[in-house]
């Protein structure tokens, strides 16, 4: 079953306007499915999976093979497996002087794929695909299932929670023991333990020294592991919001696991009844809001605000030159704390939204509105 992705029109537009389009995002989030859907209506496309030996064999002489595809759109899946192709892609893009010649799919960020950003500067447009967003599937699934299983299609679309959990467990093992080994210096056992520790502390400020001491490795190693998980889209790092608030601001970033299905399985939780009574439940709701905010507003930076005096707001962002404060409350009867009101007074945002698992929101106070996740996205689009 194909679920229409909100980014689809952006990718079609990019194919019309630049020589190379890149769809980047975590493994198994639907990049290949989306690419095949978009190009399936084209007669002149060729798809190469760089993890498939028979497709890799076609690139034994890559210049010869790719040069023969001048009249086709070439789709290269899992491009991070063969980064030496980037200079050749650049050369052919310059030679052919046509848009829509390459669609490359990658499970690593441009920062990890430095060769692409350097070789293809001015010729490539990046489009980030996330696991399924709530406004893409909310007509067919309930929020409890989405919070438990996360947004990876093969997890969310499974017929029951048990099969979904088994798929995520296999995904975590394969990702740690195979995919991450592509990057040098990774110890799978230490990475798994770190990921589990981050799941227990989901949405908390990170202390690299403390994590390193617990793992028996240096804080530099922990930082490198966290950077790699961020670069492969498994973590979202949320920096603190500074704006002349002095030394009261907490300066360590917060770390969220980007998919709730991963978090629940790293904690060995099964069923909504288990997560709803777990200490991590509030951070699961924050992560869900964050992922949907970033997935719908891909160029938006998110920050958190917290002072040593107890003032705090989960997320601060700016959209259309409007400053937005977002507080996440995993309850059907949300209220703001004294610390929340203190943060609002400090930040002085243009809009304050309290995001709760409600069907329809309501005005809470002057300038403060309770909203559902979909209502948040709708409100932000019309600012």
Image (cartoon, helix red, strand yellow):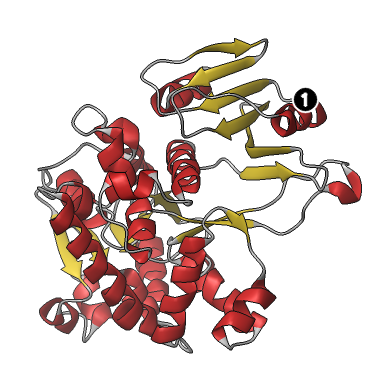
Q: Residue at x 82, y 41 (%)?
A: 243
Describe residue 5's horizontal placement relative to residue 267 as left or right: left
Instruction: Return the residue at label 1.
Output: 348
The image quarter in which residue 374 lies: top left
Q: Answer with left or right where residue 62 lies relative to residue 277.
A: left
User: Where does the image place residue 233, in percent across and percent down from the top left?
Assistant: 43, 60
Query: In the rendered view of the protein, which quadrant contains the C terminus?
Result: top right
Question: Would residue 208 appear left or right of 354 to someone viewing this image?
Answer: right
Residue 283 location (% of width, % of height): 50, 47
> Image point 73% across, 29% down: which residue?
338
Q: Nearer the viewer, residue 142 or 135?
A: 142
**Residue 157: x %, y % from top left:** 16, 47
The image position of residue 204, as x and y in percent, is 60, 55
* 296, 374: nearer the viewer: 374
Q: Residue drawn 57% across and 16% down?
A: 369
Residue 113 visible in the picture: no
Q: Residue at x 10, y 80 (%)?
A: 54
Q: In the rendered image, which quarter is residue 26 located in? A: bottom left
Is 294 rendered above or below residue 52? above
Q: Secondary structure at mark 1?
A: loop
């Amino acid at each position: 079953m194909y679920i229409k992705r909100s980014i689809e029109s952006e990718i079609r537009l990019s194919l019309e306007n630049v020589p190379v389009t890149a769809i980047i995002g975590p493994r198994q989030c639907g990049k290949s499915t989306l690419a095949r859907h978009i190009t399936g209506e084209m007669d002149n496309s060729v798809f190469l999976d760089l993890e498939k030996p028979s497709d890799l064999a076609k690139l034994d002489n890559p210049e010869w093979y790719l040069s023969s595809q001048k009249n086709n759109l070439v789709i290269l899946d899992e491009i991070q497996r063969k980064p030496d192709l980037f200079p050749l892609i650049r050369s052919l893009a310059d030679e052919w002087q046509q848009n829509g010649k390459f669609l490359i799919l990658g499970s690593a960020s441009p920062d990890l794929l430095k060769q692409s950003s350097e070789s293809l500067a001015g010729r490539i447009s990046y489009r980030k695909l996330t696991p399924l967003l709530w406004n893409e599937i909310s007509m067919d699934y309930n929020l409890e299932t989405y919070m438990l299983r996360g947004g990876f299609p093969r997890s969310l679309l499974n017929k029951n929670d048990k099969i979904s959990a088994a798929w995520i467990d296999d995904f975590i093992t394969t990702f740690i023991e195979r995919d991450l080994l592509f990057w040098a210096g990774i110890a799978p056992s230490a990475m798994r333990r770190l990921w589990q520790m981050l799941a227990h502390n989901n949405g908390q400020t990170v202390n690299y020294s403390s994590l390193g001491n617990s793992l028996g490795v240096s804080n530099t190693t922990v930082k490198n592991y966290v950077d790699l998980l961020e670069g492969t889209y498994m973590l979202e790092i949320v920096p603190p919001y500074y704006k002349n608030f002095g030394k009261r601001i907490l300066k360590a970033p917060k770390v969220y696991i980007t998919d709730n299905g991963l978090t629940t399985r790293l904690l060995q939780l099964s069923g909504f009844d288990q997560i709803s009574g777990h200490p991590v439940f509030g951070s699961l709701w924050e992560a869900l809001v964050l992922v949907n905010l970033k997935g719908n507003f891909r160029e938006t930076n998110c920050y958190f605000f917290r002072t040593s005096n107890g003032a705090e707001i989960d997320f601060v962002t700016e959209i259309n030159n409007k400053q937005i404060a977002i507080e996440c409350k995993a309850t059907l009867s949300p209220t703001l704390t004294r610390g929340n009101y203190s943060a609002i007074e400090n930040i002085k945002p243009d809009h304050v939204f309290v995001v709760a698992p409600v069907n329809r929101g309501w005005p809470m106070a002057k300038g403060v509105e309770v909203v559902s996740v979909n209502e948040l996205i709708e409100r932000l689009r019309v600012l």
